[in-house]
Image: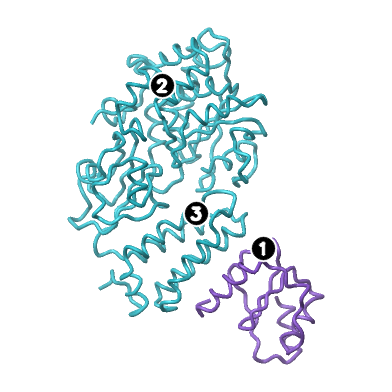
């Protein structure tokens, strides 16, 4: 998480906040990063993947190979995030 | 009221071997070892004995499934983990009626073909462990267990295993893990313990109260036993009332007794001369009932039809003037803390439900937050190794249905209605 924060800062992404979430229910496929409100979920993320993810945040392409989470779980977590209370 | 386990009402004096023999103690065992194990199981099945640990599974079926397994050896586990908040019935049985419990264990072992029984007892129950330990010594001296029980070909070894003091440790497969020397994590089912249990062998895991019912059934017969209770729930059950009522305590009542009798006649009514707002017949995991359901008979089918469950008989009351949001938040926090954490779905569900309830408590999220509870519960239904994942659902969903005004009060004013 500290490394992600560093890379977000290095890229000058001033409108991106890096924060932890209590539980996505997908530890077995972790580490997990959810981009919100963009609604992209990257699973089994390694440090080597962070540049592609921050590129995406900067307007680059979706990292398809890390998009492996079951769609029903994604939908549930996105809805919870949409309530605006987490 | 006459009981089966406590024929002269709940007493506090420990029953030693001499006293137990005066009321026919170990006569059921003497009769049983002259019968075949299948005949013993038949009697238990005809008595319609159901498990008292919460699920109400037919005991005769469980014993029969275990007995039928060709794999050897077989084990019997007495589950005295008893970590349901407010439940003290198993402790009481082990402390006061240790020989009744031990005779039940020996009968179950005989019926299931077990050569070893483990008595899994809450490690905090020092009095119960001592009482059972002393009674085991007396019973062994009397040849009721050990080599050639009462001169028969049946031999049985018995050992006590202290149970860790946490909720999940009382789950049947978590108990098996602890006895095997591992941490109290439930196993994925199937396979069920009756086929693959302790050390991978067929194992019957029975609650203390369930086992205590076996001697009277085998002594007096299934027909006599069915004279207590109802057609679907025969016999008696021990109910626990806590500080919500004027006379907290343990009460043995025939199944089918109205809930009102337990609360008003046994418990002396709700404390503080207040009205009942909600009843939880099987705290902490059953649905709430409104006070209009106070005449519901205390049996499995009637409770199910009323929208709740009987569980292991810990009845809790919520008084008028209390806030149901605060009540379910406490329940949800309990399950979040007690989830063992091995199943991601359970971790996510319990944490999310508690977070949602905290937001409601703080008046955040508005109407959309109320819609999330059902979605989180539905998503996780059937997931997880054990039943803990299904436990927060009934209290939360029934609270939302029966007391929406408490949730609305928090969300619209940000204040707890109980504080007004």
Q: Is residue B416 above or below residue B9?
A: below
Q: Is residue B289 above or below residue B187?
A: below
Q: Residues within 10 Å of mark 1 (few under 14, many from 20)?
A: some
Q: Secondary structure at mark 2?
A: helix
Q: Which residue, as the protein is rendered here, is positioned at the far left? A: B273
Q: CA distance from mark 2 to mark 1?
A: 48 Å
Residue B324 position by quadrant: bottom left
Q: Secondary structure at mark 1?
A: helix
| Chain ID at mark 2 | B
What color does chain A have in the rendering? purple
Which residue is located at x 20 percent, y 57 percent?
B275
Label 3 or label 2, whichever lies nearer to me, is: 3
Residue on which disc 2 sits: B215
Q: Is residue B56 left or right of residue B384?
A: left
Which residue is located at x 51 percent, y 52 percent?
B388
Residue nearest the viewer, comparing B368 with B413: B368
Label 3 or label 1, whichever lies nearer to me, is: 3
Residue A43 position by quadrant: bottom right
User: In what quadrant of the picture does the C terminus of chain B appear?
Assistant: bottom left
Q: Is residue B273 left or right of residue B390?
A: left
The earlier-in-sequence mark between 3 and 2 is 2
Report whether mark 2 lies on the same chain as mark 1.
Answer: no
Which residue is located at x 31 percent, y 36 percent?
B255
Residue on which disc 3 sits: B390
Q: Is residue A40 left or right of residue B334?
A: right
What color does chain B have in the rendering? cyan
User: In what quadrant of the picture does the N terminus of chain B appear?
Assistant: top left
């Amino acid at each position: 998480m500290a490394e992600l924060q560093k890379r977000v800062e290095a890229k000058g992404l001033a409108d991106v906040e890096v924060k932890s979430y209590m539980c996505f229910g997908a530890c077995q496929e972790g580490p997990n990063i959810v981009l919100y409100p963009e609604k992209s979920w990257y699973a089994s993320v390694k440090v080597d993947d962070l540049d592609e993810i921050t590129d995406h945040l900067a307007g680059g392409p979706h990292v398809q190979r890390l998009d492996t989470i079951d769609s029903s779980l994604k939908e549930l977590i996105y809805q919870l995030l949409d309530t605006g209370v987490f | 009221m006459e009981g089966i386990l406590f024929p002269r009402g709940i007493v506090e004096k420990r029953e030693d071997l001499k006293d137990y023999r005066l009321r026919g103690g170990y006569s059921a065992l003497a009769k049983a070892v002259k019968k075949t194990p299948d005949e013993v199981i038949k009697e238990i099945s005809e008595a319609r004995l159901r498990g008292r640990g919460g699920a109400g599974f037919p005991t005769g079926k469980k014993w029969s499934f275990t007995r039928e397994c060709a794999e050897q050896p077989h084990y019997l586990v007495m589950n005295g983990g008893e970590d349901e908040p407010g439940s003290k019935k198993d402790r009481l049985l082990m402390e006061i009626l240790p020989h009744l419990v031990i005779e039940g264990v020996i009968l179950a072992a005989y019926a299931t073909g077990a050569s070893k029984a483990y008595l899994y007892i809450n490690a905090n129950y020092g009095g119960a462990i001592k009482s059972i330990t002393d009674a085991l010594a007396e019973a062994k001296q009397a040849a009721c267990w050990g080599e050639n029980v009462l001169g028969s070909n049946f031999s049985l070894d018995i050992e006590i295993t202290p149970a860790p003091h946490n909720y999940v440790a009382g789950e049947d497969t978590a108990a098996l893990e602890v006895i095997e020397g591992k941490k109290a994590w439930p196993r994925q089912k199937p396979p069920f313990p009756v086929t693959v249990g302790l050390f991978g062998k067929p194992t019957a895991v029975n609650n203390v109260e369930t086992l205590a019912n076996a001697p009277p059934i085998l002594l007096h017969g299934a027909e006599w036993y069915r004279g207590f209770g109802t057609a679907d729930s025969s016999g008696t059950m021990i109910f626990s009332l806590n500080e919500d009522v004027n006379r907290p305590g343990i009460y043995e009542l025939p199944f089918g007794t109205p809930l009102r009798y337990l609360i008003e006649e046994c418990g002396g009514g709700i404390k503080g001369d207040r009205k009942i707002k909600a009843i939880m017949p099987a705290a902490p995991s059953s649905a709430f009932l409104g006070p209009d359901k106070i005449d519901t008979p205390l049996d499995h089918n009637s409770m199910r039809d009323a929208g709740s469950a009987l569980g292991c008989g810990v009845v809790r009351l919520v008084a008028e003037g209390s806030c149901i949001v605060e009540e379910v938040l406490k329940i949800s926090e309990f399950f979040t803390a007690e989830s063992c954490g091995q199943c991601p779905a359970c971790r996510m569900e319990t944490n999310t439900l508690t977070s949602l309830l905290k937001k409601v408590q703080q008046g955040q999220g508005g109407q959309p937050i109320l819609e999330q509870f059902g979605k989180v519960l539905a998503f996780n239904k059937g997931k997880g190794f054990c039943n803990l994942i299904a436990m927060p659902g009934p209290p939360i969903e029934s609270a939302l249905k029966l007391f929406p005004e408490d949730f609305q009060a928090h969300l619209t004013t940000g204040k707890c209605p109980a504080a007004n």
